[in-house]
């Protein structure tokens, strides 16, 4: 969170959301043939001999997400996708961190799964005898929430000197050179900002998924930015951790790097159209509603917490672009499509105002909201079976 240049409206809304602080629990780190339980303040895993420098690669998941075999397939797919990275950047150490969250009574199972995943070793093709190492380790920690896994990984590697973090989701499939292109561009940029893949959300054959696909097709923002499904971000952006107030990891990165005073406010955020990934939209109506609700709270709380110029730019140029007179009308794809966009954004704005007003009232009454449910819990499906994404 940068600065304190916020309006009274922002401050009023911000008071209505007060999540509990992230629990400071020990975590279990699992490597090939070894395990360590470390305190939450540890900045390195003692005696593990992990590589220094290079990139951290994070794959978060959780025990209740899917069967162990599906998680193994996801790890194998990620390791195979890192093969071209190793070939193009043999000098770059890569440390893959598999984050396995667990609920009540699931800790032993989380550790068991990580033992299997790390014992198999890297499946990426060898990059030559002088190549930097590719290491696989796992973290077992209580959930829920992807930011909690990100924070644990960042804390545990604070003294290892990673230039950046590549993180993805366990149901994403990459084109063959997707990750290599991301890493190459990130290094070309001097390992600054964030670089993301162009992730295509495939629609399942359900009314909820098809409706969301049609809505999304007319509400594409004028500028793209990396999404959490597949992105690399400079370590400095997340070095202090993602605050408990953030409901989305990519939302945190976006608001940290958005620069409304610059000629190109998104100069620190880049999406590569030729680095492609595939993922499914939620198929069940309940999951779609949960995701939309969480997304709304993420928009509202980010805009309440960050300086007014950042919030104003996000409101008018990104989130509600096309909603005249609050934002510029978008006729770039024809007047008819612009009017359809206006209607969709007007409905979205009504929901947005309801959420913002609700938080403001809660803040004024001293009864802030403490929790927003996660979306599509347990709804795991890989988009294209096995192998890489086409293209």
Image (spheres, rainbow, N blue to C red):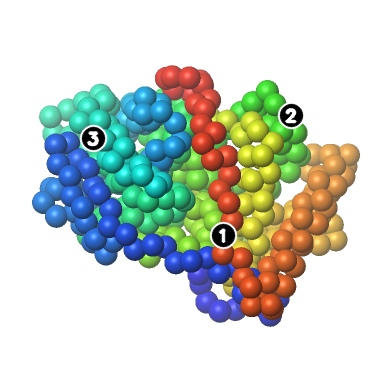
Q: Sequence order check: which comes first, mark 3 or mark 2? A: 3
Residue visible at 46% across and 51% down in the picture: 145
* Mark 3 → mark 1, Cα distance in angstroms: 32 Å
Q: Which residue is mark 3?
A: 115
Residue visible at 38% across and 62% down in the picture: 23
Question: Would you say the residues marked 3 and 2 are in contact, meaning their CB atoms lie under 8 Å apart?
Answer: no
**Residue 156 placement (x, y as % from top left):** 26, 56
Query: Which of the two marks, 2 or 1, is nearer to us in this view?
Result: 1
Q: Give the class, few, some or many, for how many residues have Cα within 10 Å of label 3's Cα (few <14, many ≥20).
A: many
**Residue 130 placement (x, y as % from top left):** 13, 34
Q: Which residue is mark 2?
A: 207
**Residue 347 placement (x, y as % from top left):** 82, 51
SS at badge 2: helix
Picture quadrant of residue 311: bottom right
Q: Give the class, few, some or many, for how many residues have Cα within 10 Å of label 2's Cα (few <14, many ≥20).
A: few
Say whether residue 5 is left or right of residue 139: right
Q: Is residue 58 visible?
A: no
SS at badge 3: helix
Picture quadrant of residue 12: bottom right
């Amino acid at each position: 969170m940068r600065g304190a240049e916020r309006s009274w409206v922002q401050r009023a809304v911000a008071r209505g959301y007060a999540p509990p602080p992230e629990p400071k629990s020990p975590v279990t780190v699992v490597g090939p043939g070894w395990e360590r339980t470390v305190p939450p303040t540890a900045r390195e895993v003692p005696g593990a001999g992990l590589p220094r420098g290079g990139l951290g690669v994070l794959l978060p998941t959780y025990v209740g997400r899917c069967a162990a075999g599906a998680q193994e397939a996801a790890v194998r797919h990620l390791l195979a996708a890192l093969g071209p990275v190793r070939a193009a950047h043999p000098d770059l150490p890569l440390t893959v961190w598999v984050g396995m969250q667990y609920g009540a009574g699931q800790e032993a199972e989380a550790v068991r799964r990580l033992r299997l995943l790390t014992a198999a070793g890297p499946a990426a093709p060898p990059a030559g005898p002088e190549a930097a190492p590719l290491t696989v380790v796992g973290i077992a920690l209580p959930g829920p929430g992807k930011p909690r896994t990100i924070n644990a990984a960042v804390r545990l590697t604070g003294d290892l000197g990673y230039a950046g973090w590549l993180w993805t989701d366990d149901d994403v499939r990459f084109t063959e050179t997707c990750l290599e292109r991301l890493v190459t561009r990130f290094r070309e940029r001097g390992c600054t900002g964030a670089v993301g893949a162009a992730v295509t959300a495939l629609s399942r054959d359900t009314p909820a998924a098809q409706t969301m696909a049609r809505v999304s097709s007319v509400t594409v923002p004028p500028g793209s930015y990396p999404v959490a499904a597949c992105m690399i971000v400079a370590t400095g952006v997340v070095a202090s951790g993602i605050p408990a107030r953030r409901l989305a990891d990519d939302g945190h990165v976006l608001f940290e790097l958005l620069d409304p005073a610059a000629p190109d406010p998104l100069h620190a955020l880049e999406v590569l159209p030729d680095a492609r990934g595939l993922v499914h939209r939620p198929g069940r109506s309940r999951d779609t509603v949960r995701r939309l609700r969480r997304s709304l709270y993420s928009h509202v709380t980010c805009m309440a917490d960050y300086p007014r110029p950042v919030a104003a730019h996000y409101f008018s140029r990104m989130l509600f672009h096309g909603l005249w007179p609050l934002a510029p009308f978008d006729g770039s794809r024809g007047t008819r499509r612009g009017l359809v966009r206006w209607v969709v954004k007007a409905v979205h704005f009504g929901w947005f105002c309801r959420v913002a007003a609700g938080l403001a009232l809660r803040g004024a009454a001293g009864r802030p909201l403490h929790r927003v449910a996660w979306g599509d819990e347990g709804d795991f499906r890989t988009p294209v079976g096995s192998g890489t994404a086409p293209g």
